[in-house]
Image (spheres, rainbow, N blue to C red):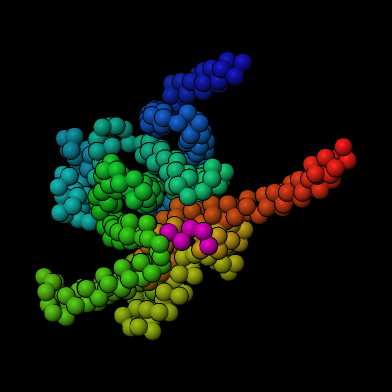
């Protein structure tokens, strides 16, 4: 009966998909084909899982996540929500499309970002252009200017992210807790919104959590395939967003160093302190081919200029301020200014928008995301921190190693969460590990009274039962 119902469901979905492809405009028809191919690819990859129970669970998680994201993306395009949630960034897909037409020999003159035309230029030319290089190839092969088709590939990547979040949480917690983390990732508004946009954040989030998973699998099993997977994520991140590569490298090294330590906090502290001391000594003795202190000051100045551009301060200074950053006027080149920027900027990244920010249409759209986020913080993440400190210090150190560098950078650069809270969205997969810890802690508390009551009942039955010695004496 169940098999028959599944067959009917698959046939119904196939009929609806065929009708949509046949009668929709060309751009939409091609997008639907891309969605079907991406869904089939995801299901095919997950079908290789040897554990039958886990395979069925992963397929279910992926399917729910993918269908939800595809439906939301389709609605966003048809009712024009995409123009509001995407802002100016949602038009960036046009540049890869134009360059792909130039590749195809069309007589058009390309104007836009210096998108690399070869794979070698992705790493030797302009930085952070990997996504646009991939998008150009996508449109070169697709040959149809469909923005929604590119969005559906983001839906596919984010649905795989949900699967990796489950797999990562399952390394430390029981199945129910891992399902909880994956379930939050499925419905979290920030993730769903990012899947509808044609920008690189969704891909970067996938690289980060996959690197986290590969690091822990390699630390536990020492299998070379997980080391290669980690290396692949680092290489891809280098082309998409170069500074993420340093965060992944430092997080992976610190995780592997502390994974089997009996005193992980001490190991993490000594490792970090030792690395910093070595860098300082090399700089003082001028044994490095570059001046680290000068590089650091240059980066701080670049971050200050960039923060002005993305905030209202840029508009005041006559620059093209896009107002996607919080306007904070601290001088991060000074110790006191940097400290204030880190404290206030981190608060914005982790907890904004605040009630006084919810008066614009775009901020109001973020209200469901904020309500769910605050519920997670108080109900699960805060208890999860306490539970991880008691029982999973290795996990806590690893999460800190992967997230704190990003949080530090975003607090000083943006002091904000940017478009659709992109900075917090990048931290979310790791934070969901703490939410899973909080859920696990709650399960333990719920089971403790039940186990205690059963033990008391067993004790009472044993006390009522006559001892064997007394029976012999009576006889």
Image side of residue 447 versus residue 74, left or right: right
Name the residue rendered at 31%, 68% in the picture.
271
Q: Residue at x 36, y 48 (%)?
A: 220
Q: Is residue 195 visible?
A: no
Give the residue drawn at x 22%, y 56%: 127
Q: Which quarter of the image is occupied by the C terminus?
A: top right
Q: Which residue is drawn at 27% across and 51% down?
A: 234
Relative depth, front residue between 331 and 443: 443
Instruction: Give 449 or 469, whichever is nearer the viewer.
Output: 469
Q: In which quarter of the image is residue 318?
A: bottom left
- Image vertical order of residue 44 relative to residue 103, above or below: above
Residue 265, horizontal then vertical, whole percent? 41, 67
- In the displayed structure, would residue 128 be above or below residue 50? below
| The magenta stretch spans residue 221 | no
- Toward the right, the furthest residue is 474
Residue 151: % across, % down: 40, 41
Dividing the image into 4 quarters, which one contains the N terminus? top right
> Which image quadrant for residue 333?
bottom left
Main SS type for the magenta part? helix
Rendered location of residue 182, percent (x, y): 51, 45
Q: Can residue 160 be seen in this view?
A: yes
Q: Give the range drawn in magenta.
A: 390-394
Taking the image as shown, residue 53 lies to the left or right of residue 49, namely right
Name the residue nearer the viewer: 451 or 465.
Answer: 465
Q: Is residue 392 magenta?
A: yes
Residue 238, percent from left and from top: 25, 53
């Amino acid at each position: 009966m169940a098999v028959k119902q599944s067959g009917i469901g698959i046939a119904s979905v196939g009929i609806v998909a065929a009708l949509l492809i046949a009668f929709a405009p060309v751009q939409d028809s091609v997008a639907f084909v891309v969605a079907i191919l991406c869904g089939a690819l995801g299901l095919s990859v997950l079908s290789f899982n040897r554990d039958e129970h886990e395979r069925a669970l992963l397929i279910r998680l992926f399917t729910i996540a993918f269908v939800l994201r595809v439906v939301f993306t389709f609605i966003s395009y048809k009712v024009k929500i995409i123009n509001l949630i995407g802002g100016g960034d949602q038009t960036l897909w046009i540049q890869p499309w134009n360059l792909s037409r130039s590749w195809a020999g069309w007589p058009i003159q390309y104007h836009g970002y210096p998108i690399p035309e070869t794979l070698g230029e992705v790493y030797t030319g302009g930085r952070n252009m990997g996504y646009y290089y991939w998008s150009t190839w996508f449109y070169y092969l697709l040959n149809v200017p469909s923005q929604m088709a590119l969005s559906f590939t983001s839906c596919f990547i984010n649905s795989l992210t949900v699967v990796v979040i489950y797999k990562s949480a399952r390394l430390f917690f029981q199945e129910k807790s891992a399902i909880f983390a994956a379930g939050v990732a499925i419905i979290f508004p920030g993730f769903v919104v990012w899947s509808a946009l044609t920008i690189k954040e969704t891909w970067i989030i996938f690289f980060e959590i996959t690197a986290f998973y590969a690091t822990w699998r390699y630390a536990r099993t020492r299998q070379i395939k997980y080391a290669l997977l980690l290396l692949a994520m680092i290489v891809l991140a280098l082309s998409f967003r170069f500074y993420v590569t340093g965060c992944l490298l430092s997080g992976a090294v610190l995780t592997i160093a502390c994974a089997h330590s009996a005193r992980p906090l001490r190991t993490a502290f000594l490792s970090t302190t030792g690395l910093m001391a070595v860098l300082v000594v090399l700089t003082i003795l001028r044994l490095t081919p570059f001046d680290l202190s000068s590089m650091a000051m240059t980066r701080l100045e670049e971050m200050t200029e960039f923060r002005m551009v993305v905030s209202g301060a840029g508009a005041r200074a006559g620059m093209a301020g896009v107002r996607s950053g919080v306007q904070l006027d601290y001088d991060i080149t000074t110790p006191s200014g940097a400290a204030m920027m880190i404290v206030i900027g981190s608060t914005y990244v982790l907890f904004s928008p605040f009630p006084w920010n919810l008066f614009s249409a775009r901020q109001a759209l973020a209200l469901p995301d904020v309500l769910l986020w605050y519920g997670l913080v108080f109900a699960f993440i805060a208890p999860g921190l306490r539970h991880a400190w008691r029982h999973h210090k290795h996990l806590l150190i690893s999460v800190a190693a992967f997230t704190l560098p990003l949080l530090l950078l975003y607090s000083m650069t943006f002091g904000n969460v940017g478009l659709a809270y992109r900075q917090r969205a990048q931290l979310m997969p790791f934070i969901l590990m703490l939410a899973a810890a909080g859920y696990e802690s709650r399960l333990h508390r719920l089971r403790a009274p039940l186990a205690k009551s059963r033990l008391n009942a067993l004790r009472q039955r044993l006390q009522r039962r006559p001892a064997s010695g007394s029976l012999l004496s009576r006889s």
